[in-house]
Image: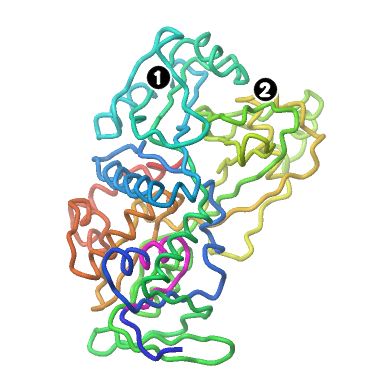
């Protein structure tokens, strides 16, 4: 192993790999060392739903501009690579069966459109709304389409519950292969001078408040790498990485899981968009099941109301049968444990929640075995905005706290981090992601009234 490097990056998830890509390929830095004790993208990045969107609420238009830039870069990369990572533009569909919530949905959609996500189109007849293509990424699709007629919703999506009164289809959204995206970026970074080392960062030497070297444990041996630039891209291990340089990052971790199950009967069309039920849900139980669950303290909670947000998307091509489903119904701060552990009933809860949105899935309840469950930790700031930029220790930088949007934000995040490191052009949203934003009294005052779930499905 070389004993020096221009830049050392701690973490080879999508954030660290994107930073390496932008430093080497776009900024011409020739000696970048990526360090991770695991295979690339395997701690958190490959546990996501692999989706992206520019549909982001305020306050302000910071996140919309940031995501628009990241999607611009994703589209350019898809063009360059012959869509190596299977980018699509199917969109996100939000649904409600509650007339009051429908009005709030329309108001929020109007606000997001005005923040720069694209126009809001209201449809009242069957002919003027067109669903998105199952494949490809039509760059002309932006904004959102709102259908407020239940019969119109059923005419386009007959597999959905007929109780849905409003559908909002956000268009500059879709998904991709996170693994393929990450490996393409890594391949390009390596071709331009980056190196990947399987090892663990164990210490960082600082002299006169300046980064001097990084210690790496590899195959039972310790190596000291002299460097003046050290980037922390440690995902859910951000707190631990920060402690090595005396920085206490204001973040916490939440465990988010997903299940994958087979749909051999084709209840869900293979070209469906990502679909989100915006209403709270009572799980589907037979009367006798509900009575039995309600009779015991440790199971009564299964008969109570669950929060909104259960969602799904098809996984794989036209001939596949797999569906991914996600529902973060129990959010609490916790220390990361690997591999993550999920309750035995987790998959069944999600399936029963999905039945509220797609009644036809009820045919699988109790008949499908145990769906595959996995997930990872969202490392978040209080306001659910990332940390990207220089740190109080000279030569130290961070690209982290990308919560559940790391895949969609990675390209813009890596570009921004590389600009900080090399002294390049900084977009006007750059100050909003600095750690030093918390030193601003006005910003801290704004946080007191900030919804911590802003931007999170």
* Number of marks in the rendered image: 2
Residue at image x 36%, y 21%? 106
Which mark sits nearer the N-terminus, 2 or 1?
A: 1
Crowd band around label 2 with a 10 angstrom C-alpha radius: few (<14), some (14–19), many (20+)? some
| Displayed quadrant of residue 363 | top right
Disc 1 crowd rating (10 Å Cα; few below 14, some 14-19, many 20+) is: many
What residue sits 62% from the left and 60% below the top? 340
Q: Which residue is mark 1?
A: 146
* Cβ atoms under marks 2 and 1 closer than 8 Å: no
Toward which corner of the image does residue 24 lie, by quadrant?
A: bottom left
Q: Foreground residue, 373 or 101?
A: 373
**Secondary structure under badge 2?**
helix
* Residue at image mark 2: 359
Residue 56 point in image, percent of width and height: 35, 38
Residue 129 coordinates in the image, percent (x, y): 42, 16
**Residue positioned 46% across, 91% down in the render:** 223
In this picture, is 46 found above or below 323? below
User: Mark 1: which secondary structure?
Assistant: strand
Q: Residue at x 43, y 69 (%)?
A: 239
User: Residue 441 vs residue 331: left or right?
Assistant: left
Q: Is residue 366 left or right of residue 278?
A: right
In the image, which disc is placed on residue 65? none
- Colour mapping used in the image: rainbow
Mark 2 to mark 1 CA distance (whole Å): 22 Å
Q: Residue 170 in the image: state x and y as whole percent.
A: 40, 29
- Residue range (magenta): 7-20
- Report the side of 20 relative to 297 (left or right): left
Q: Is residue 402 magenta?
A: no
């Amino acid at each position: 192993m070389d004993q020096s490097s221009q830049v050392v990056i701690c973490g080879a998830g999508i954030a660290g790999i994107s930073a390496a890509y932008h430093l080497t390929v776009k900024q011409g830095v020739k000696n970048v060392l990526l360090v991770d004790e695991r295979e690339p993208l395997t701690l958190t990045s490959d546990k996501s739903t692999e989706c992206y969107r520019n549909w982001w609420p305020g306050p302000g238009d910071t996140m919309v501009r940031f995501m628009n830039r990241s999607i611009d870069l994703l589209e350019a990369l898809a063009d360059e690579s012959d869509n190596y990572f299977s980018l699509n533009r199917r969109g996100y569909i939000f649904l409600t069966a509650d007339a009051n919530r429908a009005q709030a949905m329309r108001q929020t959609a109007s606000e997001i459109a005005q923040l720069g996500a694209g126009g809001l189109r209201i449809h009242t007849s069957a002919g003027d709304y067109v669903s998105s293509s199952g494949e490809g990424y039509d760059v002309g699709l932006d904004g959102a389409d709102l259908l407020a007629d239940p019969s119109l919703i059923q005419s386009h999506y007959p597999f959905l519950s007929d109780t849905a009164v409003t559908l909002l289809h956000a268009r500059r959204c879709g998904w991709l292969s996170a693994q393929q995206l990450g490996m393409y970026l890594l391949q390009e970074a390596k071709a331009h001078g980056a190196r990947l080392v399987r090892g663990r960062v164990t210490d960082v030497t600082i002299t006169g408040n300046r980064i001097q070297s990084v210690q790496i444990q590899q195959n039972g041996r310790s190596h000291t790498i002299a460097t003046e630039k050290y980037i922390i891209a440690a995902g859910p291990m951000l707190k631990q990485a920060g402690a090595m340089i005396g920085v206490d990052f204001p973040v916490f971790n939440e465990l988010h899981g997903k299940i994958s199950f087979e749909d051999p009967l084709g209840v869900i069309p293979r070209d469906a968009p990502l679909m989100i039920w915006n209403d709270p849900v009572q799980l589907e139980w037979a009367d006798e099941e509900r009575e039995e669950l309600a009779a015991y303290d440790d199971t009564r909670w299964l008969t109570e109301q669950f929060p909104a947000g259960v969602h799904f998307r098809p996984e794989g091509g036209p001939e596949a049968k797999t569906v991914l489903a996600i529902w973060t119904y129990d959010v609490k701060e916790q220390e990361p444990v690997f591999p993550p552990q999920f309750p035995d009933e987790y998959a069944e809860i999600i399936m029963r929640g999905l039945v509220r949105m797609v009644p036809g899935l009820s045919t699988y309840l109790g008949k499908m075995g145990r769906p595959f469950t996995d997930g990872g930790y969202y490392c978040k700031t209080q306001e659910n905005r990332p940390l990207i930029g220089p740190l109080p220790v000279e030569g130290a930088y961070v690209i982290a706290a990308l919560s559940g949007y790391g895949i969609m934000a990675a390209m813009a995040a890596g570009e921004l981090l590389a600009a900080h490191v090399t002294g390049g052009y900084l977009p006007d949203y750059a100050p909003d992601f600095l750690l030093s934003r918390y030193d601003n009294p006005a910003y801290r005052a704004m946080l007191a009234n900030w919804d911590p779930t802003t931007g999170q499905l």
